[in-house]
Image (cartoon, rainbow, N blue to C red):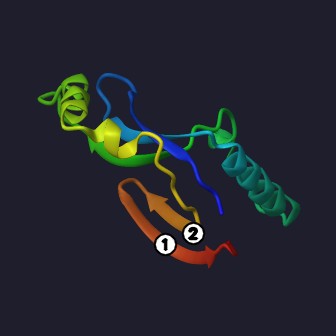
Amino acid sequence: MLHHKARPTNTTTKPHQAQVLAIEVTNNEQLSRLRTAIISTLRDSGVAISDRFLGDFKPHITIAYIKTKKVDPHALLENARELGIERELTGKTLLINTISLILARENNYREITRHRLKC
């Protein structure tokens, strides 16, 4: 069983690209070990792993992609704080009990297979 504290975050790409509104997963040592074990197992099995995401591991839960300049993401986060979202998220735990293989093409995601962890 993996539990992690979550806190709201905003990740920004280039100004002309979409911005990602995400919840950052913190205190993720167990998640990092799980990731390392899975990547090692895949590599040992001859599966090629993209190096694009193998660097700095920053687990998060994507809430929304903001693709318009009409919404100020900083104002959006401030409004969320005023509504009490930090009270709802800060210090909460997340249960991770499934690993899924997802086919991701642009904005389309399709689950190929899922494996339940024995927690």
Q: Depth check: 117 or 70 in front?
A: 117
Q: Position of residue 41 (x, y in %)?
A: 82, 62
User: Mark 2 touching mark 1, by CB under 8 A?
Assistant: yes
Q: Where is residue 110 in the image (x, y as percent from the top left)?
A: 44, 70
Q: Is mark 2 on a helix, strand or loop?
A: strand
Side (left or right) of 54 relative to 95 = right
Q: Which residue is disc 1 drawn over?
A: 111
Query: Could you tell me which quadrant the N terminus lies in?
Result: bottom right
The reply to whether residue 48 is visible in this rendering is no
Q: Look at discs 2 and 1 and give the one toward the viewer.
A: 2
Q: Position of residue 57 (x, y in %)?
A: 64, 38
Marked residue nearer the N-terminal end (2 or 1):
2
Side (left or right) of 93 relative to 10 = right
* 80 versus 30 height, above or below: above
**Callout 2: few (<14), some (14-19), or many (20+) C-alpha neighbours within 10 Å?**
few
Q: How far apart are marks 2 and 1 (CA)?
A: 7 Å
* 117 versus 2 height, above or below: below
* Quarter where residue 86 is shown: top left
The reply to whether residue 7 is visible in this rendering is yes
